[in-house]
Amino acid sequence: MKREKLRSLAPLEEPRSPTDLRVRQLRARDLLRGDLEGPDLERHVAEAVMPTTMSKAIGWARANSIFPATFGLACCAIEMMSMVSPRYDIARFGAENMRASPRQADMLILSGRVSIKMAPVVRRIYDQMLEPKWVISMGACSSSGGMFANYAVVQGADKFMPVDIHVPGCPPRPEALVFGFNKLQRMILGNPDPGWRRRYNAIGTEEWARPGTGTATEEEAEAYAAARELSVAYDSARARESRKGPA
Amino acid sequence: MPDSPGLELIAHELDSASAGSVLGTYHERGQACLIVNPGAILDVLEWLRDTPGQEYRFLASLHGVDYLPAEPRFGVVYELLNMPRVERLRVRAALDDPGGEQLPEIDSCVPLFATAEFQEREVYDFFGIVFRGHPDLRRILMPEDYVGWPQRRDFPVGGEPVIFTHTEREVPRWYA
Amino acid sequence: MSVHGSAPARGGDVIARTGAQVIGTSPVERTGAGEAMGPEQELMTINMGPHHPATHGVLRLLVSLEGEVVRDLKPIVGYVHTGIEKSCEDKSYWKAIPFVERMDYLAYFSNMEAFVGCVERLLELEIPERAKYLRVIHLELNRLHSHLVWLGTSALDLGAMSMFFYCFRDRDRVLDLFEMSTGQRMHTRYFQVGGVFEDIPVGFERNLRAFCAEMPSRVDQYEAILNRNEIFLRRTKNVGIVPRQRLLDLGVTGPLLRAAGEPWDLRKVEPTLAYGDFDFDIPVGTVGDGYDRYRVRVQEMRESVRIIEQALDGLPEGPWIADDRKVVLPPRHELSTSMEALIHHFKLVTEGFRVPPGEAYYAVESPRGELGCFVVADGSSKPARVHIRDPSFVNLQSLRDMCLNGYVADMIQNLAMLDPILGGIDR
């Protein structure tokens, strides 16, 4: 009879009051216990499970299984390596799987100073990574040139590639890098437009899996073109929105 | 380190072995240095390496120096080491700046000391001092198409004020 | 088979055969091995790095292969060239210390000691006994740290993943000690001209003794994992042997030279600081292969612990920095009472101290060999030239001799046992 009461109380909309929330909690507990069945179960699923969106689910999955590229530049690389070590253990956040090939990685940690000789190489490695991809610039040198204001060092890596997170320090402690990584996770979860395509005037450069040259039919090619157009339109709409600023 | 009379003795013997090779000596802070004529650098190094009683067989370091206001302008410094006696001797070849587009030249000592290969390339890279007879004289640390000799004193240090290409107008939403 | 006139055809030299226009000085890198081959043989020249997980940084290797055998090899460096030597000329002496630290980023105390010792030699400044002992303690801790990172990453290259975790666990303990005494994990700027920045804090000695008591057993554990590991032995034994005389000609120093049987260690032969006071051994190898290099370094870790323990036992009381007001900052408490101290402080912080003209070379034994610093002073408060003779840079020349006519897999092993630090090579 308690459950009868609950059902009469529980609305199908968003919880409006603490009582609603409490009702939901009780229902979730029932679900876990296995007591919830029949129409109750369906209702609960419709209320609590379905109202997420596909993009949120994908963002959640992406943020929690990032494959960083094994790429060390200078001093910071040693602290980056100790991020994987037992004390700091980045595996807690699902990013312990360092990939040696940029084609398999989706996060690049710029760990150290970028010299003018290295910059084209870094850029090429970034270009080889598949989208979606993120970049953490670790330490003062790759963020701004740091103390090395001279002829040999690029003054900040975002001169030649998009950077999502800057972690300060010389070198940053592994904790700082993990914190920066957590911020990147939040960013991926929130799925905001990082805005770099607009900044670098690169809208329309998204990569798409192309149909194979030998097997491509007319319909496939058309579908590809349509999808690409849609994506470009979506991106420019978002760019316009973010230029306007948040409401 | 050879002491001060020992250094003069070396200078004297060197001068009699190949005339006009030693331009000067100095002995300061417990360190001995021979200033030699760059034309005779191979003779000097070979003599120091092979003469019984000298046997400076280990080239610890080779580097270039730019003494800009002073003349001669450039120096190529060889830090020699006698391992059994643990004695260090510095040999400095004093090079004039030929001026204009021309680069100063000196003989390469790679045939005598194989270790000099990278270090001579480094001196060439940073000071534009050409080592005649070097097996592979190219830039080593700077990009190959780089123009200029960055560690000369008249080369600017470089650097620039940092401009951030993107500044958030406010704290973004995902930052909480 | 000559193509045009006297120019001989080179194996793999496409440019010469096609007569394509060459732009720039030398756009196509190539090794020399192809020239010795007959026209029907072919070498494959591949590029390794600068982004490669086994090159310990951004080293690029150009390798000519015949099948799986390395016929020629050429290291190409400069990808983290930072212009530190030039930047030092733009800073006063005490501001240049953080720059030289960032050259060989695993041996920052050694870099500091080379530069600071060189400036002290120029100034003819004697540092107090306690500072000498503190410097020795930190230098040896740094050697432990460097060898731990080397052991972890090298074993990782050879397939022993767990070594990486064990070594980094102990490395963090060393860094904790650094953090306790200096305030930073890496790049501590602890050594000053004239001594050290600050005395060690209360409790440092206790922690250090606990560490020293535990470390030898840790080293035993590492040896238990690797010493009789079949894979490790097969990959390192009798691989990469270079004759001792050839190593000396190439200017190689440090554990590589000692593994070949030459007992050359600057701590023994030119005892600077307080190294003359301690009783320690120099491990040497017999064969000079990769396994000997590994054993020499591991044994050096034990010797470092011995030195640290002796330095702690004999740590003298007294000042930790020299009392020369023209060079050393006055103590903080004097600033509020003494006008003279305030003036000195102001002069030192704004302009820095002046060093009499001259030049000096000062070498220390870093974890990788002879790390020498050459400073030219012109009488002003900024150095006219700072040059660091980095052991990795010189040792790298021996890589070709090690790898020639071996397999590609042995090249990885040789590189791991060479222990190059690219920040030191490129500076």
Image (cartoon, coloured by chain):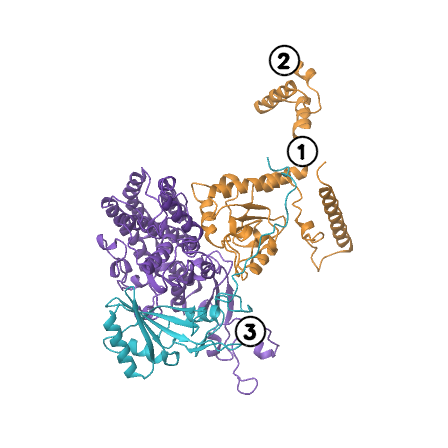
Chain colours: A orange, B cyan, C purple
Residue denoted by label 3? C25
Residue A164 seen in this snapshot = yes
Please state which of residues C114 and C15 is positioned toward the viewer in this rendering: C114
- Say which element carries label 1: loop
* Quadrant including the N terminus of chain A: top right
Q: Are marks 3 and 1 on the same chain?
A: no
The residue type indicated by label 1 comes to Thr
Horizontal side of A94 relative to A1 (left or right) equals: left
Disc 1 or 2, which lies upstream in sequence? Answer: 2
Residue denoted by label 2? A2
Horizontal side of C340 relative to A188 (left or right) equals: left
Does C57 sit above or below residue C203? below
Which chain letter goes with mark 1? A
Residue extending furthest toward the top: A1
Which chain letter goes with mark 2? A
Residue C293 seen in this snapshot = no
* For discs 1 and 2, the disc positioned in front in the rendered view: 1
At x 39% / y 81%, what residue is drawn?
B39
* For discs 3 and 1, the disc positioned in front in the rendered view: 3
Does C327 sit above or below residue B52? above
Residue A204 location in percent, x, y?
Answer: 72, 52
